[in-house]
Image (tube, rainbow, N blue to C red):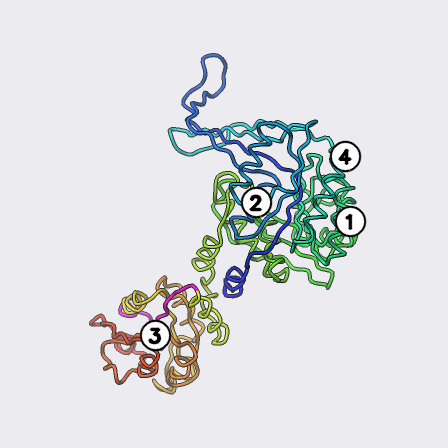
Amino acid sequence: MSADLIDLVQNLGQPNVLVVGDLMLDRYVWGDAERISQEAPVILLRADTREERLGGASSVATMLRALGANVALAGVVGRDVDGNRIRSILTDLGISDQSVVPDPERPSTVKERFIGRAQHRHPQQMIRVDYETRAAVAASVEAELVQAIARQLAKTDVVLVSDYDKGVCTPRVLSAIISEARKRGLRVLADPIRGRDYSKYHGCSAMTPNRLEAGLATGRTLETTEEALEAACQLRKQLDMEAAIITLDKDGMALEHRDGRRQVFPTRPRQVYDITGAGDMVMSVLGMALAAGADYDPAIRLANVAGGLEVEKIGVATVTRDEILRDLLRHGPNGSQKLLIRSILQHELESRRRLGQRIAFTNGCFDLLHAGHVQYLQEARAQADLLVVGLNSDASVRAIKGPNRPVNSEEARAFVLAGLQAVDYITVFEEVTPQSLIHALRPDVLVKGADYRKEEVVGAAFVESYGGRVHLAPLREGYSTTRALQKLGAA
């Protein structure tokens, strides 16, 4: 169901999020991979574009800012050109760098990727060059960072720890964050390193390791979703967490919660172009949704959607609320998800209305779908942004058509209708007329066939009373369910 996620996106607000972790600069060099060099058996890249983006914990901050959060970033940069560039980009994006500590003894972390286009298209990453040190920051830098974070926590709704194992997220730093956050009733979410010892994350609210990381930390091989749930349970208990969430790439995410919830949230198949940044996106959306007051279940489902959008992009890219909403609207109701009971459909349509969408409604038995029906439904759908079909129940059809109808059950009829692109939602009604359903759904456009006069259309006066309109759709000649059944000897 997409209505609750649409509501969640619309009510995310502007939470104050503190991101703590390893700041990085991602540099991309693009060009055409034209030929093999004459000097050595290597590809020659003719560079034409250079791009710089924030990476690591600063990538999480960038993603949160694109989603509309107020973001503060805490971490360490070198006193160098790259460190200045990181801070400059943060300022340009409106991300607070008051808790970013300069360290003259270490370089800023830079990851430089060279991306070649074959025959001027089909870009592929050729090589990545890293400039970094992984040593833990000095005790004096730790102390300065802890003090800066403590000041920032007073104006924070949630803390995200993005640990890339570059020396910033030391046990001392994390212990201070977790302790102070607990005193303030703040959640701390951690995206951990790949390692066997996760003791430094003890006491955080939740963590989001991927399949490989969780397997390494628990000494398990996570091939099935059940094994992932067992690993999540082990991590949650060992680290005294509220919840453990393991990301399972194409299999979605597994949640194990202190209250006993154990669930796997599947994800929709995507065209994967680049997995870089997917974990950061999941962490960003989870943190923002939880800060907005959402429970873990909808927060994880929304993070699944955002992570899916991220892997459809090249490199570490941002995703906006509008992109998430478009994806939910495009892919939320499909197949059997189009068939909704009345109360849930009302909620779904309210979400659509808040997005400024107009709703068309029509109704019928649709017992034996034919070309005339298809043309009619396409005409109905063209009148608004989405089309709802009220489908007569089997009992309702018998009351109208007689004891030998319908030929197809309401389940079968709904399934066939759901396969039509023109139909966005279907709901079954038991009454002989759709009057009460129209009153409940309040469509903007009421559609009926041109063989009716407007005054004969059930619900017409009601729809026009609040500014809606009635559209009489032309019918395709020569097509009739009754006529088709007569030819088959079934009527």
301 to the left or right of 152: left
Q: Is residue 295 left or right of residue 1?
A: right
Kindly report which numbered mark, 3 or 4, lies closer to the viewer in this rendering: 4
Residue 98 on image: x %, y %: 63, 42
Residue pointed to by mark 1:
202
Q: Amino acid at mark 1?
A: His
Q: How many marks?
A: 4
Cα distance in 3D space between marks 3 and 4: 70 Å
Q: Which residue is mark 4?
A: 140
Inter-mark Cα distance, 4 to 2? 25 Å
473 relative to 400, above or below: above
Q: How far separated are the C-alphas under marks 2 and 3?
A: 49 Å
State the residue position of label 2: 95
Residues at discs 3 and 1 in contact (Cβ within 8 Å) = no
Q: Earlier in the sequence, mark 1 or mark 4?
A: 4
| SS type, badge 3 | strand
In terms of sequence position, does the residue under pointer 4 or pointer 2 come before the other? Answer: 2
